[in-house]
Image: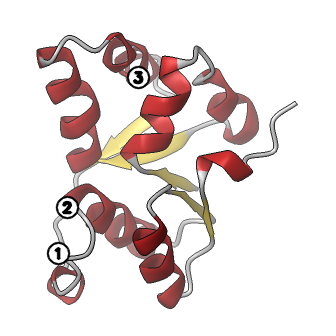
Amino acid sequence: MIVCNASPLMYLAKIGKLDILKKLFGEIVIPNQVYEEVVIKGIKDGFIDAHVVEKGINDKWILVKEVMVDKELNRFASEIDVGEIAVINLARKIRANLILIDDASARIIAESFGLNVNPTIELEID
């Protein structure tokens, strides 16, 4: 299972390449906090890419999972945002194969928990 943060979704949707994630992984999982940031806030703020991500959710290849922020991860709240904390927490809970996350601090924190992490730029795209 692949867990994805907001920035890979937004970057790929903005350039019309969100389907790359579907081709590479079949389906991805996002925590509800990322859904709120990308889709709910994005639509409210008028971002077209929010609708592209919403379509992936409606087509059921982007799955939204409810996740509570673990107290152990709250200590990183001054370094990374709530979406990144939720992604790391969800990945730990479901034993994800990979996390897609771009923020360098979030990648380091995720790796410190033994998680496999890639930024968007390192995706192997044909």
Asked if marks 2 and 1 touch (Cβ < 8 Å), the reply is yes
- Spatial separation of the CA atoms under disc 2 and disc 3: 19 Å
Q: Quadrant of the N terminus?
A: bottom right
Question: How far across and down, in percent of the image, does residue 124 sit?
Answer: 81, 44
Q: Which amino acid does label 2 sit on?
A: Val
Asked if marks 2 and 3 touch (Cβ < 8 Å), the reply is no
Q: Image point 16% across, 81% down: which residue? A: 74
- Spatial separation of the CA atoms under disc 2 and disc 1: 7 Å
Q: In which quarter of the image is residue 58?
A: top left
User: In the displayed structure, would residue 14 be above or below residue 33?
Assistant: above
Q: Image point 41% across, 38% down: which residue? A: 63
Mark 2 or 3: the one toward you: 2
Question: How many other residues sit within 10 Å of disc 2, few (<14), some (14-19) or many (≥20)?
Answer: some
Q: Is residue 101 left or right of residue 90?
A: right
Q: In which quarter of the image is residue 85?
A: bottom left
Q: Quadrant of the C terminus?
A: top right
- Please state the total of marks drawn on the protein image: 3
Indicate which disc, 2 or 3, sits on the residue closer to the N terminus: 3
Q: Please give the label number shown on residue 82.
A: 2
Indicate which disc, 2 or 1, sits on the residue closer to the N terminus: 1
Question: Label 1, on which residue?
Answer: 77
- What is the secondary structure assignment of the residue under circle 3? helix
Question: How many other residues sit within 10 Å of disc 3, few (<14), some (14-19) or many (≥20)?
Answer: many
Question: How far across and down, in percent of the image, does residue 13 sit?
Answer: 50, 22
- Spatial separation of the CA atoms under disc 1 and disc 3: 26 Å
Q: Is residue 15 left or right of residue 83?
A: right
- What is the secondary structure assignment of the residue under circle 2? helix
Q: Which amino acid does label 3 sit on?
A: Val
Q: Image point 42% across, 14% down: which residue? A: 52
Question: Label 3, on which residue?
Answer: 53
Question: How far across and down, in percent of the image, does residue 121 sit?
Answer: 67, 47
